[in-house]
């Protein structure tokens, strides 16, 4: 039996209610996506990032109080979820990708471009989950090996990829 896939938890950050609703509508047919929150400005987005820990953030660039880039800097790039910028301004694309954005969508949203960005996000998140599982498994195996050696049980040899 195949285990149930984990839902992608999404936060939508945009000062325009119609833009937030548009993103929600484009996400609604996707059963693997759950919109866990919305925010309308930078400080609200920072609070939502801390409280909700989304996997994916749809982020407007020009919002009141703090723009999207200020949100990225304030939250910290190492703690940010995958980010897809959604903005009416195409002139920030290079800066967005320099900030490690996964994609950059220009309003009004094009359905095909939106779907392509969502597919890219799914692939990135699957890769990140696989890396996380591998790291946890490696730590578990190392702990098991150390426990066996402390207890005087035979040494377990785990071949590496280069030993095949």
Image (spheres, rainbow, N blue to C red):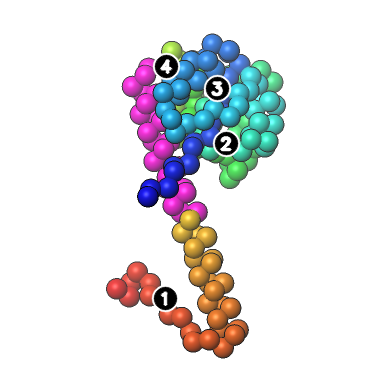
State whether residue 39 is above or below residue 157. Answer: above
Sooner in the amino-acid sequence: mark 3 or mark 1: 3
Q: CA gap, disc 1 to disc 2?
A: 36 Å
Q: What residue is shown with label 4?
A: 109
Does 63 appear above or below 146? above
Q: Which residues are magenta?
A: 110-132
Which structural element holds mark 3?
Answer: loop
State the image quarter where residue 32 is shown: top left
Q: Name the residue beneath numbered marker 3.
A: 60
Q: Position of residue 118 (x, y in %)?
A: 41, 30
Dot 4 alpha-carbon crowd within 10 angstroms: few under 14, some 14 to 19, many 20 or more:
some
At 50% across and 54% down in the image, what residue appears?
Answer: 132
Q: Which mark is residue 54?
A: 2
Residue at the spot of label 1: 158
Dot 1, how many residues are within 10 Å of its Cα: few (below 14), some (14-19), or many (20+)?
A: few
Closer mark to the observer between disc 4 and disc 2:
2
Residue at 37%, 19% in the rendered image: 111
């Amino acid at each position: 039996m195949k285990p149930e896939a984990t839902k992608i938890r999404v936060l939508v950050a945009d000062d325009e209610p119609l833009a937030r609703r548009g993103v929600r509508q484009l996400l609604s047919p996707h059963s693997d996506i759950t919109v866990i929150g919305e925010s309308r400005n930078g400080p609200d987005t920072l609070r939502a990032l801390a409280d909700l820990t989304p996997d994916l953030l749809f982020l407007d660039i020009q919002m009141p109080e703090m723009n999207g880039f200020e949100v990225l800097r304030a939250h910290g790039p190492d703690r940010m979820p995958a980010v897809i910028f959604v903005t009416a301004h195409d002139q920030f694309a290079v800066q967005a990708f320099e900030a490690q954005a996964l994609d950059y969508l220009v309003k009004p949203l094009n359905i095909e471009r939106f779907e392509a960005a969502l597919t890219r996000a799914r692939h990135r998140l699957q890769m990140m989950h696989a890396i996380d599982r591998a790291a946890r498994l490696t730590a578990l195996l190392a702990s098991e090996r150390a426990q066996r050696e402390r207890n005087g049980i035979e040494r377990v040899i785990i071949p590496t990829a280069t030993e095949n």
